[in-house]
Amino acid sequence: MNSEEEFFDAETGEAALPAGMCLFFLHVCCQSPTRPPVLPIRAGVRRFLKTLPAQMISRSNFSIWSILKKCIGMELSKIAMPVEFNEPLSFLQRITEYMEHTHLIHKACSLSDSVDRMQVVAAFAVSAVASQWERTGKPFNPLLGETYELIREDEGYRWISEQVSHHPPVSAFHAQSLKQEFEFHGSIYPKLKFWGKSVEAEPKGTMVLDLLKHKEVYTWTNPMCCVHNIILGKLWIEQYGSVEIINHSTGDKCVLNFKPCGMFGKDLHKVEGYIQDKSKKKRRVIYGKWTECIYSVDPKSYDAYKRTAGDPKRLKQVRNCLMRSLPAPTQNENSCEGEEADEMPDVQETVTVIPGSALLWRITPRPAHSAQIYNFTSFAVTLNELEPGMEKLLAPTDCRLRPDIRAMENGDMELASAEKERLEEKQRAARRERSEEDETWSTRWFQLGVNPHTGAEDWFYTGGYFDRNYSDCPNIY
């Protein structure tokens, strides 16, 4: 293999990035658009996995620095990573974790007031990144044409995603209510940079939520994400940046500020923002932590609380004084120069509740043994489960059928590494063959178009996946 092929076909997109950070995927299968057939289930009740077949391995014997030391300031789009730094999920499965708190969408559908609906949609947008906390492995990069489906009758939706592009890496997804109450779709194109001790991720792509009953369409983008201590120390994650949620039907807007950690760790994980109507009048204030919970309160109550909660001007003066005593940074403010680890601030993981507040969302507790299974949530544990007989109904491109992910889940790292290399070489060979025959890749279930609400290019589900006709699917495994 020549050097050019090695460069352009290495793992793409999230190298060194813990588990799908941009920035974030059970399965019974259906034969008709409205009703899936029942797969074999034990004792007549669908029971989901509660743990993985094998515990995660130690990464202490592997040096990520040997791979990344030449990549400072570069976009990590074509850097191959050893399988030991992965978690046993594909990125397509990882973005399915947006649906872990689907009950919030159902709640929004049930509300009659548009501001109340916006509150809950804002909570859903925050909940979509909650599973990233403490996920220190990166997902497997999807192969071109790879798919993932998920049908949850208990949660009332079905999901399909496809890797529609390899360079750049683009993952498209579409979820729809089984009762035609909502549709949720979008595409993710993660852009990453390595800054010496941290990896910064920009999760390009727009989320679109359509509440069909109310004829409302909401759009937003995900916040920036930074993973600290890539080289030395304990990995920790912060989300930061402004997220603007727009109700294109009413003109209501929610602006959320995911706060960066700051010098003293006071703002670590904090989210604050507000909802305004089309006349730009503030209707509600949103606050909380993306790792814990989100509340809503009346703006007057919020302002009154802030006036009595201390002297923020004095705190700002102290911070400015300390900042002037520090040497000027040589990279951007989120980079991590130096040889010492960036210790995660020791902050209390609770939210002070302002009187009169309403709880919008609280994170689901993780399994007690989560640290031994890649810090997976209970939802993430189930995503690679393969029920008996399911492989006969799934598309042959489904992530559950990937041998490298399955081998890692079972604890066979030698086989996982060998299969990963085999699949990457098979993908390279297929690309060379298409190039020689002057052929272009055709997506199966999504097509590129223009988002009518944002005016930007986006990928849209064309239908047909759940008809179960997979005769033209490529052999990618």
Image (cartoon, helix red, strand yellow):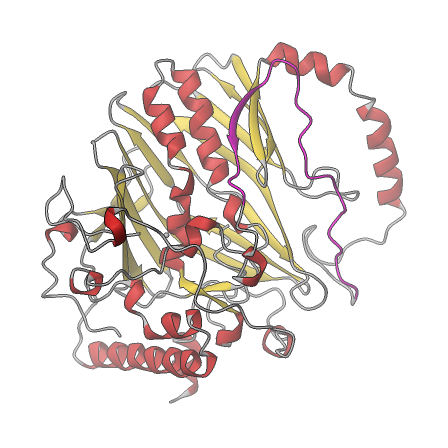
Q: Quadrant of residue 228?
A: bottom right
Q: Residue at coordinates 31% horizontally, 63% vertically from top-left?
A: 399
The rendered magenta stretch, by its main secondary structure, is classed as loop
Location of residue 22 in the rendering, given as x and y in whole percent from the top left corner: 49, 51
Residue pictured at 46% horizontal, 50% vertical? 378
Q: Is residue 15 magenta?
A: no
Q: Is residue 248 visible?
A: no
Q: Position of residue 273 (x, y in %)?
A: 57, 26
Residue 198 sits above or below residue 37 on the image? below
Q: Position of residue 42 (x, y in %)?
A: 26, 54
**Residue 115 relative to residue 451: left or right:** right
Q: Quadrant of residue 431?
A: bottom left
Image: magenta residue range: 340-365
Left-right relation of 14 to 389: right
Above or below residue 279? Residue 292 is below
Residue at the front extreme of this rendering: 43
Is 354 included in the stretch rendered in magenta? yes
Name the residue nearer the viewer: 3 or 373: 373
Q: Is residue 215 visible?
A: yes
* Residue 343 as seen in the image, left or right of residue 416: right
Image quarter of the N terminus: bottom left
Q: Nearer the viewer, residue 196 or 352?
A: 352
Between 68 and 119, the one lying in front of the other is 119
* Residue plotted at (46% across, 36% down): 125
Q: Quadrant of the C terminus?
A: bottom left
Q: Is residue 448 above or below residue 70?
A: above
| Picture coordinates of residue 19, whole percent (x, y) | 50, 59
